[in-house]
Amino acid sequence: MTDQFSKSKVALAVTGGIAAYKAIEVLRALQRAGCDVRVAMTRHACEFVTPLTFRALSGSYVIVDDYAPDNPDPIAHITFSQTIDLFVIAPATANTLAKLANGVADDFLTSTYLACTAPVLVAPAMNTTMWQHPATQRNIEKLRNDGVHIIDPDAGEMACGTIGPGRLSEPDRIVSRALEILQRNGPHTSSSTTDDDDLRAERILITAGATREAIDPVRFISNRSSGRTGFALAEVAQRRGAKVVIVAGVTTATPPAEVELVTVNSAEEMHQTVLERASESTVFIAAAAVADYKPKQSAATKIKKSEATLKLELERTADILGEVAARRREGQLLIGFAAETDDVIANAQAKLTSKNLDMIVANDVSRNDIGFDSNDNAVTILVRDGSPPIELPRASKTRIAEQILDEIVKLRQRTKKAKTA
Ligand code: CTP
């Protein structure tokens, strides 16, 4: 990744909100990817983090006020904006969004935006009520129409104690999106571009998260899946034009805001829901960690600890992916995941064949640094049509999702060609 982005010049603008400190993580991760990053701040941002912090980390003068006597460049907003491949604004306050949407250019950041011909990526962060206000939503809509890339804020507990959408999206999601834009656009030419929609012809059904198998009304068997991988696939696929439905079990990650979501609890509920929805889909991605066994009987009342030992008899759950494969529609692509602790590739290869899949994504769940409960993953993709295995080195789950979807696009192109040949 470092080589790929080593010539990319990114401007990172920080505005005045409590999430300003998270811009430090954005800066560091962009640098780790190889980007050359320069930072600008609004005056209010300096109330939260000092320009010195960003100067020390970026190694460059941080522009707050282009009229400042120590600013080395007299027309900084022009030089700054026209020598970059991407302009990232994170966090962006409601006030900054309003100014950008209306072409107000009363400080360095907003004048740079107007003078900028590179793609612009904006990550808003603010109190939930401010985010949901019609004025803010109008401004977001205007910016989207102007070709600006927006990363919707996450839902969660805010600094002010309220719960709802408004929290700055995770830095690794912002950086993945930034790298995706850089990758798609290559070195910047003068016209601004929007996201590719190479998945627009697809309807993608994705399972995510863990299932819960009831032992009694208060106890269950489950696993550590967070749902992050399925959610990342859904978010990226929808952004690339696909119509996406997620069937999620129990998750700890935040689902993407604008994707249709059906929530279920048990493997059997997931099984029923998937069978109802699978025939509408052109691609099925089974990213859920479905329980393979469930208690043969779930007690109607809470089990009391009367005996020294308790025996639970378990029985197999339905193999959801296997059943979708058995009823496969013409042209439907089926993608599975194989979470393995040993003989990762051989086991995944065996599943690819036995389940009659088009592609399987294998990951080594014995590693602590990736996989379950982690933001990162490293996987190997095996494809049934005999193309060589594709190793995706450790990266954020969003980045891995982008690469898995790239492979799905390639596979679709190969199957279409094979059909017409
Ligand atoms: N899967 C499913 N329904 C199940 C179990 C798994 O759809 N009841 C899907 C998973 O979402 C994943 C793939 O099948 O895409 C995993 O295959 P599986 O053979 O079930 O893997 P493991 O559960 O890891 O199997 P094993 O324990 O035999 O390794």
Image: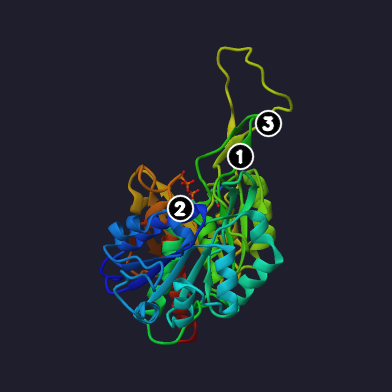
Type of the residue with mark 2: Phe
- Image height check: is 296 above or below 241? above
- The answer to which of marks 2 and 3 sits earlier in the sequence is 2
Res 159 visible:
yes
- What quarter of the picture does the C terminus occupy? bottom left
Task: Name the side, left or right, on which 310 lies relative to 5.
Answer: right
**Rendered residue at 70%/30% (across/down):** 217
Judging by the rendered image, the residue that carries numbered circle 1 is 212
Mark 2 beta carbon near ligand 1 (under 8 Å):
no
Q: Position of residue 321 (x, y in %)?
A: 56, 55
**Rendered residue at 44%/69% (across/down):** 88
Q: Which mark is residue 374?
A: none
Q: Position of residue 141 (x, y in %)?
A: 63, 73
Say what secondary structure mark 3 lies in.
loop
Type of the residue with mark 3: Ser
Where residue 323 sits, quadrant-wise, is: bottom right
Mark 1 beta carbon near ligand 1 (under 8 Å):
no
Which of the pair 394/349 is nearer the observer? Answer: 394
Res 202 visible:
no
Tell me the crowding category of disc 1: few under 14, some 14 to 19, or many 20 or more residues within 10 angstroms, Cα based: many
Where residue 303 sits, quadrant-wise, is: top right
Judging by the rendered image, the residue that carries numbered circle 3 is 298
- Image height check: is 66 above or below 366? below
- The answer to which of marks 1 and 2 sits earlier in the sequence is 2
**Rendered residue at 63%/72% (across/down):** 139
- Image height check: is 312 above or below 378? above
Judging by the rendered image, the residue that carries numbered circle 2 is 48
- What whole-number distance in Å separates the C-alpha atoms at marks 1 and 2? 43 Å
Mark 3 beta carbon near ligand 1 (under 8 Å):
no
**Rendered residue at 36%/59% (across/down):** 51
Type of the residue with mark 1: Arg
Say what secondary structure mark 2 lies in.
loop
